[in-house]
Image (tube, helix red, strand yellow):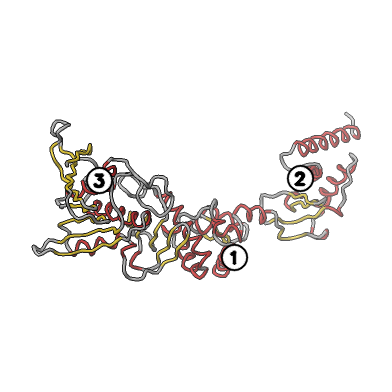
Amino acid sequence: MKYELTVDAEYLDPRRWDAAAGIREFLQNGRDAAIEQNAPLEVTHVVRDDGVGVLRIENEGAVLTKDVLLLGRSTKRDRQDELAGFHGEGLKVGALALLRAGHEVKIRNGGEVWTPSIQASEKFDGRPVLVFDVTSGRAERNRVRVEISGVSQDDWKALREHFLFLYKREIELVKTEHGSLILSPKFKGRVYVKGILVQTIPALEYGYDLSDAELDRDRRMLDSYDLNNRTHRIWAAALQLKPALFAQYYTLLESRSRDAEGLTNWNAYLIPTDLQEQAGARFKTENGENAIPVENLATSKDLEHLGARGIVCSPGLSALLRASIGTPEDFQAKLATETTKIYSWSDLSTAEKANLERAISLLNNVGEKVSLDVVSVVDFRSSGLKGLYSAGSIKISKSELSNRGETLGTLVHEFAHKYGVDGDKSHVAAIERLWSAIVENLENSFPL
């Protein structure tokens, strides 16, 4: 019986859907049958007497029903496990790709033989479409075997490495809930999804077998963000299982490797806490106790003015080090308020002493209690900082004391912090109240 499918012979781009893609679809279906139906998968390559190579993909204990010829028919759509198929089109598009590439395909299914071909449609004005001829009369056998003719030994040897589940030699890997980190150098740059190769990225230092991924129409990775996020989760989980890998991961971060691009400020918490601390200790050992990770030269320059070493790092390494070392902003705020020198009364000039005493007196004259007991004259690490209020004490920059007005303005501003922080309405109101009281007191003392 002939089954004419509504699949045009030109369906899918042949540049992407070549013979290798067709074989991939049949192998994917075979592996899924092994998982879903407990039908062991056996893949063999034989050479016929006529010298033609034949690839055989066989599942013992599985039988296909005719509804698999419907485009979109799938038993796997609701499965969230190891099954690789989903769209319900693997058998159809796999056969189409192989036929267009010049291969013969036979599917021995139970007691039937299904033979796909491309023929002129009897229903659609002679358009070439995919057709399956199904013949019966063979001995019934509970198995499905796909035979693909025209596959050379060399082609199959190269192609089989696209499928981790067919690899015979031991592979060094770390298996996690998010997928596997493949450590064997041979697999460098290869990205698999559920054991099937979808991309080769030379910039990657390791191989990856993702437990799941959003693939595009041609079974390739959809975008780099998705890949980066998934490889980061694999690394984070692998480090939980094998902390000894951390030295290798740190090197990836230092070298700005593609493997570590998925580490961001938002997901750095996935790295084990003890390894975050280890990263901070290593960074300090290599760069000094005053070293701070930054992402650009501008921030490095700003920190140098404050007496710290801004070490330009990759965004990933900076994100990892934030937990144990802190952010550049944290250090800028901390260092900016640090004092480099505290002055004694004898260190001040006559004019500086007079300006400070006058400012204190003006505040006391309006009912505020201020004395030299709570005022310190200092040099701040940041030249732009004029004063600082903390826990009832005031620090004022020595550079302000040379000017009588600046001395009073700074003292008023800092004393007003007793009532609120910078920008707070209470702070602004306190400044206005103090100035108003000082001016009124001066007017009363020296009436016009």
Task: Residue type at mark 2: give it.
Answer: Thr
The answer to whether 38 appears left or right of 94 in the picture is right
**N-term mark: 3 or 1:** 3
Q: Is residue 349 left or right of residue 171?
A: right
Residue under the point 25% across and 46% down: 93
Disc 1 or 2, which lies upstream in sequence?
A: 1
Lateral position of residue 315 relative to residue 72, left or right = right
Q: What distance separates the C-alpha of mark 3 from that of mark 1? A: 49 Å
Residue 19 left/right relative to 262:
left
Label 1: few (<14), some or many (≥20) within 10 Å?
A: few
Closer to the chain start, of discs 3 and 2, is: 3
Q: Amino acid at mark 1?
A: Asp
Q: The disc labelled 3 sits on which kind of residue?
A: Val
Mark 2 neighbour class, 10 Å CA radius: few under 14, some 14 to 19, many 20 or more: many
Instruction: Please provide percent x and percent y for residue 390.
Output: 78, 51
Name the residue tied to disc 3: 93
| Tag nearer the camera, 3 or 2 | 3
In this view, 442 is above or below 308? above
Name the residue that disc number 2 marks: 410
Whole-angstrom CA distance, mark 1 to mark 2, is 45 Å
Question: Taking the image as drawn, is residue 393 in sight?
Answer: yes
The residue at the point 81 percent across, 36 percent down is 435
User: Which quadrant, please, contains the N terminus?
Assistant: top left
Q: Are marks 3 and 2 in contact (CB under 8 Å)?
A: no
Q: Quadrant of residue 437?
A: top right
SS at mark 3 in the image: helix
Residue at mark 1: 274
> Residue 111: x and y, percent?
21, 52
Is residue 300 depicted above or below 157 in this figure?
above
